[in-house]
Image (cartoon, grey):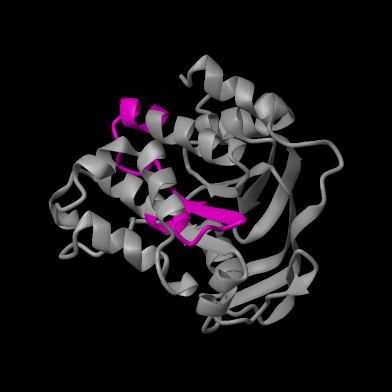
Amino acid sequence: MTSAPVVEARNGAAPARAATMLSVHDINTFYGHIHALKGVSLEVEQGEIVTLIGSNGAGKSTTLNTIAGLLTPRTGTIELNGRSIGGVPAHKVATMGVAMSPEGRRIFPRMSVLENLEMGAFTRGKPDPADMERVFDLFPRLKERIAQKAGTMSGGEQQMLAMGRALMAHPSLLLLDEPSMGLAPKLVETIFATIVDINRQGTTVLLVEQNALMALAIANRGYVLQTGKIVLADTAHNLERNEMVRKAYLGEE
């Protein structure tokens, strides 16, 4: 179960009638001949935590990778603060304020914690000391391990590093892909509490997560993906109470 402060954060995290930061409309993404995303549309307002939930292979990571510019949609539009980013290369999307912490962390194992964090700031030319301090405030363990090779750290520490590296780009929109994967329950609570802190500090979050219970506990709104299509969209509170969601993703009979 998630802690009370994390749950409370959802109820007041996003302002009513906030400006739309991310608008995805009717995107279709393919892997060769495989039609992975089928007319996906979603919106993320400034200041929100929005979550995408669904089973393995539903298209959650593909959606994030398409937004981030790692994949190009065949049709449809993606706009960030009113500017088209559909088909824009990933490194240029990053300079526009989008950063992603990918599934599987993908840290640089032979580099130190400090070097990994510095790599996160590459789109800005050089690391901002204020961003580095923010990361260390959110993840004190990283400061303790600053000279350690990233590949020798625990899974939880590597997840902290992946998120910290993304934050070094000073994003306005943070894409998080399965941040709880492979972590012990206590560490999962810590990671989700930190996501709330990041959001409270002003970063909008789009979260992909198989732990639907935890994701809905901290989110303002959510979308449910099945076989490449959005099948439900609602407030997180309503999705928690939805019978189909409870049976399919919250483990209830």
Note whether residue 58 is visible.
Answer: no
Using the image as rendered, state which of residue 160 and residue 71 is in the foreground: 160
Note whether residue 126 is visible.
Answer: yes
Residue 106 location in percent, x, y?
31, 62
Residue 160 location in percent, x, y?
34, 45
Which residue: 75% across, 44% down?
233
Which residue: 65% across, 28% down?
10
Up/down of 64 relative to 139, above or below: below
Which residue: 51% across, 84% down?
32
Q: On the picture, is 234 further left or further right than 252? A: right
Q: On the picture, is 157 further left or further right than 73? A: left
Instruction: Quadrant for residue 134, please give it.
Output: top left
Magenta stretch: residue 123 in it? no
Using the image as rendered, state which of residue 52 and residue 251 is in the foreground: 52
Q: Which residues are magenta?
A: 165-189
Q: Residue furthest front?
A: 129
Using the image as rendered, state which of residue 206 and residue 141 is in the foreground: 141
Residue 4 location in percent, x, y?
54, 15
Residue 76 location in percent, x, y?
75, 75
Which residue: 53% across, 40% down?
198
Locate the C terminus and report the quarter of the image it occupies: top right
